[in-house]
Amino acid sequence: MKKLFTSESVTEGHPDKICDQISDAILDEMLRQDKKAHAGIECFVTTGLVMVGGEARTSAYVDVQEVVRRTIKKIGYDKPEYGFCYSDVGVISTLHEQSPDIAQGVDVGRGEFKEQGAGDQGLMFGYACNETKEFMPLALSLAHRLTRKLSEVRKKGKLAYLRPDGKSQVTIEYVDGKPKRVNTVVVAAHHSENVTTEQLRSDITTHVIKPVLGKLFSKNIKIFINSTGRFIIGGPPADAGLTGRKIIVDTYGGCAPHGGGCFSGKDPSKVDRSGSYAARYIAKNIVASGLAKECTVQIAYAIGVARPVSVMVDTAGTGRVGDARLEEIVEKIFPLKPAEIIRVLKLERPIYEQVAAYGHFGRIDLNLPWEKLDKVREIRKLAKAK
């Protein structure tokens, strides 16, 4: 049986990703000074304007103007002709103090329950599969590699006419549940007026698509590059951006469910972030153990309560042991309370801006604690014990 499945990615210069990176850059600066900082930082960008809002409780001092401009410059919006430039953009900050009603639920010794509870209610998902070496879905893995390559050839000057905004999309053809071939590639590349559409399409094929796809490239792939014929106006002048509006790009490209909460701007007491990282940690170790070809993990919390209200493991019929047995193993060996997750995964560190573009999972280019495979042997041992 054949089916097609598609995932997308966006570059660091996409308006929503600008916001994610600003939110996490501010959070990182807080954590650099105060590892117990609590924050929920949101960002909005449009032509000539960045607005930062949300709440925080920290002893840190953050120069929001400086962090915003530094982040925008690093992304590549460094020329006024782009219509959005770090040096002249307006920055408004409306951060306020965290609500004490929320704080008492996450502070040890306060609230109805005395241990550190979840920073909010909600449901989080983690996923892993054996389609790629990073245990991520193939379509999303390729889509991220395309946008990263688009950024690389821009920053290295190989395609000097490129600008920071951009997107990619990859469609994979599956046969009997296994990825067979790349069916379609879509690339949108933000560019100056100093290139023709024909030249840009040829360059993107040669310098971006072919190197990324490698042996997967063939003349039968359908390719769409700047399919409107023009992408000169890009970034915030083309579309307003918001923190947390690319949650499927950030996670599993649509291959797994999503609880709805974003990551960027949130300290790890907020289980939208830490619970999702824990769920990925669990799912990846299960697949890496060889006990399943794919695995979805759901964890759900009540605000102020430490223990999850539910833990679910679903191996979609690929498990070598039952899902109920895997749930028992998960409850036994993995951190599930917020304080445990934060301690085991060492999340009170300024490590978040680096994952605010090109995905939070499967990042083998980074040493991320939720990507480590240190529970594989223990999972196998417990699976054999019963």
Image (cartoon, grey):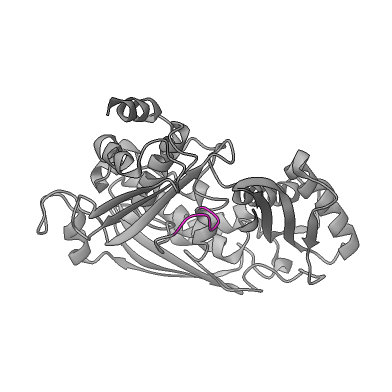
Instruction: Name the quadrant containing residue 15.
Output: bottom right
Q: Residue at x 37, y 36 (%)?
A: 321
The magenta stretch spans residue 255: yes
Q: Main secondary structure of the magenta part?
A: loop
Image-based side of 110 in relation to 244, left or right: left
Work out whether residue 378 or residue 95 is closer to the camera in this orientation and state it: 378
Residue 158 seen in the current view: yes
Give residue 359's position: percent from left, percent from top. 54, 50
Give residue 376's position: percent from left, percent from top. 40, 29
Work out whether residue 290 or residue 116 is closer to the camera in this orientation and state it: 290
Range shown magenta: 252-257
Instruction: Name the quadrant containing residue 103.
Output: bottom left
Q: Residue at x 47, y 67 (%)?
A: 43
The magenta stretch spans residue 333: no
Image-based side of 345 in relation to 101, left or right: right
Instruction: Name the quadrant containing residue 170.
Output: bottom right
Q: Quadrant of the C terminus?
A: top left
Give residue 343's position: percent from left, percent from top. 28, 38
